[in-house]
Every structure is written in C-alpha cells, then in structure tokens.
C-alpha cells in the first residue's frame, strides 16, 4: 500500500525490520499455536529447525518428504502434532513420474481405475498449478480407496494428521466443476467432500484433519475437520506492491486493509460468527505469508524477516481471538517471541474501533491495529486491570497507564529501502514499572 501524499512518507521514520524483541522478565509464556514449514526441513537430521518447531502445538508441512525418525520423536515428546500435506481434490499429472513415499496408488488409479476420476485425462490445475487429475468422490469405490490409503500411511509414517489443501469447490477450475455437474447434477461437490472427510475420520479415528478454507463452503465441510485454515487473509507473498531497487523489481508483502469489501473486518468477522455446525472441532487457524523486508547493507540491500508483516498478521487475527502464523516460506523467517507471549483470555466480545485504531484487550495485554495508512491516536480504558504500564513488544517502548487509561499513538511503517508505507499491528503487554531507569526491554517485569 502506498500513501498518496509523498510528504507523509517523508515524515515517517524508516523501519528497522530486523529489530529484536524481548519479553519482559517473568511474563507468562505458552507454546505457539501453529507453525508452517517444508517437510524437507524435518527430513534432515540433525534438523536445524527442530528447536523452533517443537515449541508449537500444530506443525503444518508442505511437501512429501518423510520426517527423520528422531525429529518425529522429538516433536511427539514436546507435544507437537505433525500434519502431512495432501491435496484432497486430486493430484498433479507430474506426480505420476515420481516414486512418492505414500506409494504408487496414483499410477494405479490412472492405469486401472480411470472411472474413479472426473476425467481420464488431466484437466487444468487450480491457479498456479500444473494440469491435474481430479477424484470423483461421489463414487464409493475411490472414496473408500483413498480413505484406506490415508489411514495406512499416516499410521506407518508417524504423522498425527493431514493438512487437506483445496478443501472445497472454490478451488476447482471451471473445467473440473463442469465435469462434476455433468456426472452429478443433483449433488453439490462440497456435500460429497463432506461425506468423504467423514469417511476418513471413521476409517482413522485417531488421525487429525486440518482443512484449508473449508469455511468458504455452504455445506458443513469445516465441521468434519479439527482445524480449518484461513490462508493469506491478513498478509500474503502475492498481490503486494512491486518496487524497483537498484534496477531490479522487488515484490513486497501484501497487507490486506481493515475496512471495505473483502477487508479484514468483513472476512474475520464472518469467520468468527460461524455457527457451531460450520466450525471445525477445535478452532480456526490463520496462516499468512510475508516477503522479505529490505534494509541497507554495505553493498546491496540485505533481506530480513518482515517483522511488521508478522505483527500485522498476528494483531488482525488476535482481534477476533484467532491463532495465527506468518510464514517466510518465500523469504526470511521470523524467530521472535511474539507467538509465545501468553496474553490470556480475551476481554469483551470482539474488536472495538476507536478512530482509526482497532483494539481488543486481553487479560495480560492489549492488541491494536492501525486501520489506515495515516498516523492515528486512540485512548483506551483498561477493563479492571491494575497494570501501570503497557510494554510495546515490537518497539520496546513503555506506555504509562494513568487512572486505568492509556493513550496509543500508532504510525504506519515505511520500508527502509523501498519507502512503501502500510498499516501496522501492535501487541502491548501489561507489566509493572521498571526497577531502574534503564530503557532496555529486559528491565521491565510482569506484574501479575
């Protein structure tokens, strides 16, 4: 997002995206809710990411590599649940050329049971994917076949469950939807998919299911999953601005605005309002992405984790009580303490907008989102809290709470190299006064 007035960008300080954060001494922590990584990462041993990954409850993977036994054992010992990627609608034609760890059943279907597919030949894939085959999940035979294969491989490989991607007709290209209508004019695709997920659960009751955007269905599809993802809703590696830096084009993180059609207020609000019969059995999860941020180096600009994207993603989801993770899948990863700060129970029914700032208080913190690209101020009365200071986890600043009231001043972020201006998210922790006048974050302490 770029601000229309150049003068505003000139007034904003450049953002040091690589700045390290520190939790105040004694502030309660908890395990992270979810993390996303490549299955290839866990296939390595020693696994360089293991200490980071086993701090999370849900570990979602992409790819077909099998985890090293020692890595899987370490995750299980830490209480993490590991999910293997599976495209629930079909598979790319190119996968027929590979020997995949879960067996040669794709070749078996194409060669011996082409009637189990919506078309015996590959059709266009979803956006950005190669030509693919699609299952006819209204047919009892392929549904039972796939349920058996999923259960057997999960048990043998040590995964706790599956991340079922493209869960819903929204992801099927028009050609596949047309073949479905020709075969099953009276049966909605998502109703058949809901039945298939129920069959998978019955075949493997110990297995967990995470779906991707099943909530978009008008069928109770999400109710068959333990978790359902809202992917790329807060931030994304796609759709962002492109800036020319030293003669080359640099794609930046996309930040979805708060207001307006398709804004976060509408999208997350609709998600939070889903009735029980259309919600996953455990909770919704938010999975966002970021592009690397750029900072000035001795030569060419250096790539760092886009920490502002992480905070925006986290704050937007936390306003609705949704667990989130912002992945650097396409660039640098964030490795800070944000995901482990235990804010406790959310207070109030949902987000409150004060001017251009959206707020929600928690037992041990306050979450804020700048709803526009201009600096804004908001005053907030704490809900029965005795805290005397709020500690800004992102910047290390301390805000006094006087008479139970605090004033927040938020400014948009400006890229150090690109100059791109965009809104920000902030997480403030309730702390006691610093024992000394030292300004380092580590001198603050939690006052429970």
Image: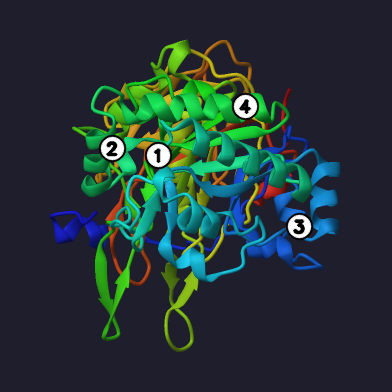
Q: Residue furthest left?
A: 4
Q: Report the residue marked by disc 2.
A: 180
Mark 2: give few (<14), some (14-19) or many (20+) Cα within 10 Å: many
Viewer-nearest of discs 1 and 4: 1
Asked whether residue 320 appears in the rendered view, the answer is no
Viewer-nearest of discs 4 and 3: 4
Residue drawn at (46%, 59%), measured in percent from left and top? 306
Viewer-closest of 421 and 439: 421
Query: Do the residues bearing badges 2 and 1 touch, measured as CB atoms within 8 Å?
Result: yes
In this rendering, position of residue 203 left or right of residue 188: right
Q: Secondary structure at mark 3?
A: helix
> Mark 4 and mark 3: span between their CA atoms?
29 Å
Q: Which label was assigned to residue 201?
A: 4
Residue 432 appears at what percent x and percent y? 68, 30
Mark 1: give few (<14), some (14-19) or many (20+) Cα within 10 Å: many
Q: Quadrant of the N terminus?
A: bottom left
Query: First in sequence: mark 4 or mark 2?
Result: 2
Residue 136 appears at what percent x and percent y? 40, 39
Residue drawn at (59%, 34%), measured in percent from left and top? 209
Can you say whether 432 is above or below 19 in the image? above
Q: Secondary structure at mark 1?
A: loop
Can you say whether 285 is above or below 347 in the image? below
Q: Report the residue marked by disc 3.
A: 50
> Mark 1 and mark 4: span between their CA atoms?
19 Å
Residue 422 appears at what percent x and percent y? 30, 51
Q: Report the residue marked by disc 1.
A: 136
> Mark 3 and mark 1: span between their CA atoms?
38 Å
Q: Which label was assigned to residue 418?
A: none
């Amino acid at each position: 997002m770029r601000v229309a007035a150049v003068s505003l960008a000139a007034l904003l300080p450049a953002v040091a995206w690589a700045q390290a954060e520190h939790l105040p001494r004694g502030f309660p922590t908890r395990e992270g809710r979810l993390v996303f990584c490549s299955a290839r990462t866990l296939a390595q041993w020693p696994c360089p990411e293991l200490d980071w990954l086993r701090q999370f409850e849900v570990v979602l993977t992409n790819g077909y590599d099998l985890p090293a036994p020692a890595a899987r054992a370490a995750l299980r010992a830490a209480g993490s649940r590991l999910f293997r990627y599976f495209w629930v609608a079909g598979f790319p034609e190119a996968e027929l050329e590979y020997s995949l760890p879960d067996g040669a059943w794709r070749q078996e279907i194409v060669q011996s049971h082409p009637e189990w597919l919506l078309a015996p030949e590959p059709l266009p894939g979803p956006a950005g994917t190669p030509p693919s085959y699609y299952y006819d999940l209204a047919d009892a035979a392929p549904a039972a076949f796939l349920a058996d294969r999923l259960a057997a491989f999960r048990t043998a490989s040590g995964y706790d469950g599956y991340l079922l991607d493209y869960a819903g007709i929204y992801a099927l290209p028009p050609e596949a939807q047309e073949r479905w209508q020709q075969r099953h004019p009276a049966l909605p695709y998502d109703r058949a998919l809901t039945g298939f997920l129920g069959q998978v659960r019955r075949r493997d009751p110990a297995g967990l299911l995470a779906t991707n955007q099943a909530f978009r269905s008008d069928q109770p599809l999400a109710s068959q999953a333990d978790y359902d993802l809202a992917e790329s809703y807060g931030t994304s590696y796609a759709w962002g601005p492109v800036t020319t830096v030293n003669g080359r084009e640099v794609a930046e993180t996309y930040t979805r605005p708060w207001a307006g059609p398709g804004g976060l207020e509408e999208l997350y609000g609709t998600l939070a309002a889903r009735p029980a019969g259309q919600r996953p059995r455990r909770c919704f999860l938010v999975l966002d992405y970021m592009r690397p941020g750029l900072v000035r180096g001795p030569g060419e600009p250096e790539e760092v984790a886009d920490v502002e994207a992480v905070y925006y993603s986290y704050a937007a989801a936390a306003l609705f009580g949704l667990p989130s993770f912002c992945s650097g899948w396409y660039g640098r990863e964030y490795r800070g303490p944000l995901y482990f700060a235990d804010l406790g129970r959310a207070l109030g029914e949902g987000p409150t907008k004060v001017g251009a700032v959206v707020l929600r208080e928690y037992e041990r913190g306050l979450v804020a989102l700048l709803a526009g690209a201009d600096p804004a101020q908001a005053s907030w009365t704490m809900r029965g809290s005795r805290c005397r200071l709020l500690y800004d986890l992102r910047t290390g600043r301390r805000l006094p709470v006087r008479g139970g009231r605090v004033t927040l001043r938020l400014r948009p972020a400006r890229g150090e190299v690109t100059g791109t201006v965009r809104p920000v998210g902030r997480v403030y922790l309730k702390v006691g006064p610093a024992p000394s006048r030292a300004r380092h974050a580590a001198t603050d302490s939690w006052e429970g």
